[in-house]
Amino acid sequence: MKIALTGGATGIGAEVAAKLKAQGHHITAFDIYEPQDTVDHWIKTDLSDPASVQAALNAAKGPFDVLINNAGLPPRDGLEEAILRVNYFGLKAFMDGLLDKLGDGASIINTASRAGAQWRENLEEVKALMALDPAELGAFVAQRKITPTRAYNLSKEALIVLGMAMTEGLVARNLRINSISPAAVSTSILEDFAVAFGDKMAKNVARIGRPGLPGEIADVIVFLASPQSGWIKGQDLVIDGGMSAMVMSDALGLPK
């Protein structure tokens, strides 16, 4: 298969590239940083810059069998606008632009997050973001007093909702879209999440025993990229070691 992968230089993306490369697939990575030798081709891409995204799309040689949209920024101070610009608008622009370079039956996988689980409660704000002209993003962030943590959560909520919204149209084109929502994962940016989510994250990780491993998340992405997952469409797969089930059990008052 020919794979297009955003965010392939580090963390989960690097693990995905290594696993797919080991299976003999051809990987084109779109990243601001150059990946290691786990990819066949690197196109330098800054998802915060529309001109860079367009140049990358022009350089992309399809047709691709899989698009894995894995790039993203963590919840870090001072990055409120950049997080939304990369994690939602950049990924969406790249995905929209690559649709005509996807082959028949292609699979799209977006990396969301368990941090996007509150999309139902925040649907009004999610829809407002999705309807926004990217040029208005600065004013949107300022008016709503969006913090880095809220920007991250909102970007992931929007990715989950976007997948649902696009499913029917993509099915009609014989394409499919899914997202994955990992909880805490042991990568170089885990500390950013520890700072952003504080005691809540620490308690949840302690409860499930450990953070996830990048390879464990990559395994699910590789499965969603494969023909074996062909009947999975429009889903958000939560990968959290049981964290969501435990929280829901508490909320429902279920017996242990």
Image (spheres, rainbow, N blue to C red):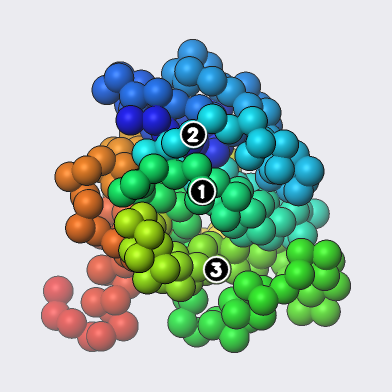
In this rendered view, identify the residue nearer to me: 131 or 80.
131
Q: Secondary structure at mark 1?
A: helix
Determine which quarter of the picture holds residue 153: bottom right
Q: Secondary structure at mark 2?
A: loop
Q: Which label's residue is closer to the chain start, 2 or 3? A: 2
Q: Which residue is under mark 2?
A: 62
Determine which quarter of the picture holds residue 150: bottom right
Task: Give how far across and how far down residue 44 sits, in percent.
Answer: 67, 28
Residue at the spot x=22%, y=52% of the render? Answer: 230
In this rendered view, identify the residue nearer to me: 96 or 251.
96
Q: Which residue is under mark 1?
A: 100
When the figure is inspected, residue 204 is found, relative to residue 50, above or below; the finding is below
Task: Give how far across and how far down residue 156 sits, in percent.
Answer: 53, 62
When the figure is inspected, residue 117 is found, relative to residue 22, above or below; the finding is below
Q: Please tell me how crowded label 3 is: few (under 14), some (14-19), or many (20+) other residues with Cα within 10 Å.
A: many
Locate residue 162 relative to residue 55 in the image: left or right: left
Task: Give how far across and how far down residue 152 sits, in percent.
Answer: 61, 60
Q: Nearer the viewer, mark 2 or mark 3?
A: 2
Q: Which residue is under mark 3?
A: 158
Do labels 1 and 2 touch, CB within 8 Å? yes
In this rendered view, identify the residue nearer to me: 88 or 216.
88
Residue type at numbered disc 3: Ala
